[in-house]
Image (tube, rainbow, N blue to C red):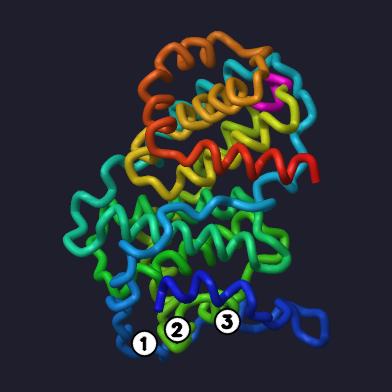
Amino acid sequence: MFSAAIAMKPSMNFQSRRGSDGETSDSDHCEDIYDVSPMHGCTDAFTSVAAAPKWSVPDQMVVDSAVLAPADPTYLNEWFLMMKSNEVKFHPVQSLNNQPQITPEMRGLLVRWLTQVCQTTRPRLLPETLFLAVNIVDRFLAVTPLGLDCLQLLGATALFIAAKMEEVHPLCAEEVVGLCDEGQYTRGQLRMLERRVLSTLGFHLTVPTSVLFLEHLAAHGQYDHLTSCLARHLLVTSLQDYVICQHAPSSLALAALNLAASLVNNTRMNTCPAVDRCILDLQLVLMTMIDRLPLPDLLMMCYQQYHQ
């Protein structure tokens, strides 16, 4: 079952991504265009959604990366305005409106599974990979009706594509298929859906995500390490909530930074006019985060990992 896979997959040992000769496996480059057997259903995987825990609190995945060094603020205003204009093109709103079978709870279950995969795969996948994968899922669902039996395959395909964009050593097709429920999908189905997703999205994969905004704003604002870590925790957990994800990535990043700073009694510094104007409109985003996120659990876990 899908929910059982969340608990079982971390203990699995996957084969190396490189062959014995040191070269990348042929499966990274070849497409099995003949393996197009029908996709088996995984509807039963979602029968225990209500019983599953509502949140999967992120672990060190979001605190291992060092905080960016303070950058030259000269072009922060121009950079922020440019990214703001781009996020409108690549941020889907109400992406499940045209999905007769997929609900926000099922999307949340998929995102929790992707978060677990990114945390437990060795070497651990970057946070940017997770955020891009979720963005790909949402953009595809916004324009393409999908059967419930293909939802986990879509998540795996999005992770497969995102890893190619963000990771130094991306996952191979066999690894990604192995992450799904045992025997659920084949490598050929993964490759087939990959082509469909890329064609649907027009190969637009360089998109401004909330974690991208966060890294730059935290660096320019010179926040301390604890504040930046907590803000990342907030963003990763927010990915699971369909309502929170309706807000723009830049607004989520600013809200996460301000909320984290208030929780650890820190102050923000070194903003720019474009950022200051957006901060004035953050009340709705902040109230949504406060209402829907498990703030005490996130704060406690962040403090524990920070002190370790």
What is the C-alpha distance between the residues marked 1 and 2?
Answer: 6 Å
What's the mark number on residue 188? 2
Q: Are marks 3 and 1 in contact (CB under 8 Å)?
A: no
Q: Are marks 1 and 2 in contact (CB under 8 Å)?
A: yes
**Can residue 208 be seen from the camera position used here?**
no
* Badge 3 element: helix
Residue 170 found in image quarter:
bottom right
Taking 198 as reference, is 121 left or right?
A: right
**Can residue 78 be seen from the camera position used here?**
yes
Residue depicted at 76% across the width and 84% down the height = 19
Identified by mark 1, the residue type is: Val
What segment is highlighted magenta in the picture? 218-222
Tag 2 or tag 1, which sits nearer the N-term? Answer: 1
- How many marks do you count on the picture? 3
Taking 142 as reference, is 237 left or right?
A: right
Horizontal and vertical percent for residue 37?
34, 90
Horizontal and vertical percent for residue 183?
44, 88
- Above or below, 37 relative to 24: below
Quickly name the residue at label 3. 174
Horizontal and vertical percent for residue 109?
39, 61
What is the C-alpha distance between the residues marked 3 and 1?
Answer: 16 Å
Residue depicted at 51% across the width and 51% down the height = 132
Identified by mark 2, the residue type is: Gly
Instruction: Look at discs 2 and 3 and give the one toward the viewer.
Output: 3
Residue depicted at 67% across the width and 58% down the height = 167
Quickly name the residue at label 1. 36
The kind of secondary structure the magenta stretch mainly shows is helix
Q: Magenta stretch: residue 221 in it?
A: yes
Q: Nearer the viewer, residue 210 or 208?
A: 210
What's the mark number on residue 221? none
* Badge 2 element: helix
